Image (tube, coloured by chain):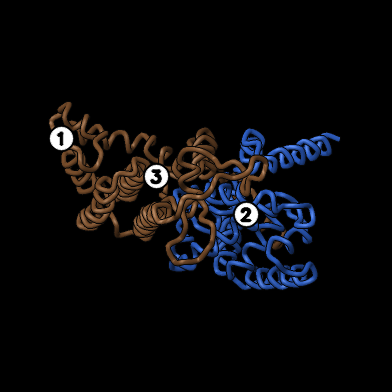
Chain colours: A brown, B blue
Amino acid sequence: MKITQALKQLKKEYLATQPSELLREHGWDALEARIKEEQAPGLMRLWYVAKKPLFLIASVVLVVILGGTGTVYAAQWAKPGDRLYPVKIASERIAAQIAPEQWKDEVAGAILHRRVSEAQEAVDTKEEMRVKHAQEEYVRTVDSLRIAGALRSETATKAAENAKESIEAMTKRRQEDKEKPSKPPKERGKEENPPSPTGNVKILQQMRVPSGDEKKVNEHDLIPSIPTIGL
Amino acid sequence: MVQEQDNIKFQTLIRNAQHGNRQAYGEIYRMLLPRIYRFVWYEVRDKQTAEDLTQVTFLRLWKAINSYDTEKGSFPSFTFAIARNLIIDWQRKKRPVSLEAIGEIEIPDGIMDTLVQKETGERVKQALAALPVDDRQLVVLRYFEEVSYSDIAKTMNKKEGAVRVKLHRILRQLKGILEKPL
């Protein structure tokens, strides 16, 4: 048997290898979901994570474990300083502790995202006490996630660092705004900057890295990047 | 003619995907999936790992699609290059596959007509498995995937002449194994 013949035989065997039916049928759907997630701007990326079926199942399990009470459910919208806020924190701690190893990153990411959102809202209200509460809650959350073993992976640690940077940048910016003397009104038609964006994008674009550099902060740099399950 | 039309269609899909058209990229995915999967599987020899690495290949390909132009060879070979890098990363983290493990792979019925052929095929297979990754991938791309020398050179970041010489040496080596008495 010549070598070329032997290779031809092996080629037949090689070509007989096919991806599983599951990959052929659903591989693209899974990949497209991942692409959408990667393309989504910062905060939206976490929405994709939170939307995942496994995370939803985990949330349902949590509500069931806690007795499925309306209080726990209502507490999920509580803000730092609110009466129900400790219930929200307690439910998060349980979620981080009971989450299986492969879900821990996602749970930690979603919880950290909550802290960043709360800090943003607190900064928006311009209430000193709310901002302080939000900062303290971030520190407590990181501690409890660490205890729950949800910050072991490099991704989760990075997510926590990013969340910290986001909150620090927000509060620093707020401090700078407070200290800045009010500008005299500008002449019409002599705007220095183009019209600024609104909402979260505006807040994120206004953030600065707390290193002192004048580097403009990209929204993507501030948002924890969380791996996905099943892809 | 049909092949030319297919090629035009494929180039259109690539251009559309480069403009962010996910549907076009989905078509490309379906067309290239079997080739990329088996190329990965041949190295990792594990279904789950092969599927994961294949998906990551296509994710990276999507991110890198705008950097593709025809100067970089054919689009499949551009994709093979991404898969190849992932395989190399994966192999760095894993122990090399033992010959015993490769020996356990079943040969589908009807491929080898006689026991002698089977033994010969088995010896070539084992010899291929024992080759360094780069050498094995040269054989796979050239003889199994029928990729041109020039595209292999681009995929593997080598000169075309070097690819030809290397393949010639590998074949001589495999031939030497075959000619040894059983």
- The quadrant of the picture occupied by the N terminus of chain A is bottom right
Q: CA distance from mark 3 to mark 2?
A: 36 Å
Q: Is residue A155 visible?
A: no
Residue at left offset 61%, top offset 56%? B82
Q: Which mark is residue A229?
A: 3
- The quadrant of the picture occupied by the C terminus of chain A is top left
The residue that disc 1 covers is A65
Q: Is A203 displayed left or right of A50 in the figure?
A: right
The image quadrant of residue B151 is bottom right
Between label 3 and label 2, give the one nearer the viewer: 3
Identify residue type, mark 2: Leu
Circle 2: element type: helix
Residue at left offset 47%, top offset 65%? B97
The residue that disc 2 covers is A10
**Chain containing the residue with disc 3:** A
Q: Is residue B156 above or below residue A119?
A: below
Mark nearer the N terminus (3 vs 2): 2
Residue B60 x, y percent position in the rendering: 58, 51
Residue B46 x, y percent position in the rendering: 46, 53
Identify residue type, mark 1: Ile
**Chain containing the residue with disc 1:** A
Q: Is A81 displayed left or right of A36 in the figure?
A: left
Mark nearer the N terminus (1 vs 3): 1
Q: Nearer the viewer, residue B139 or B25?
A: B25
Residues at discs 3 and 2 both on one chain: yes
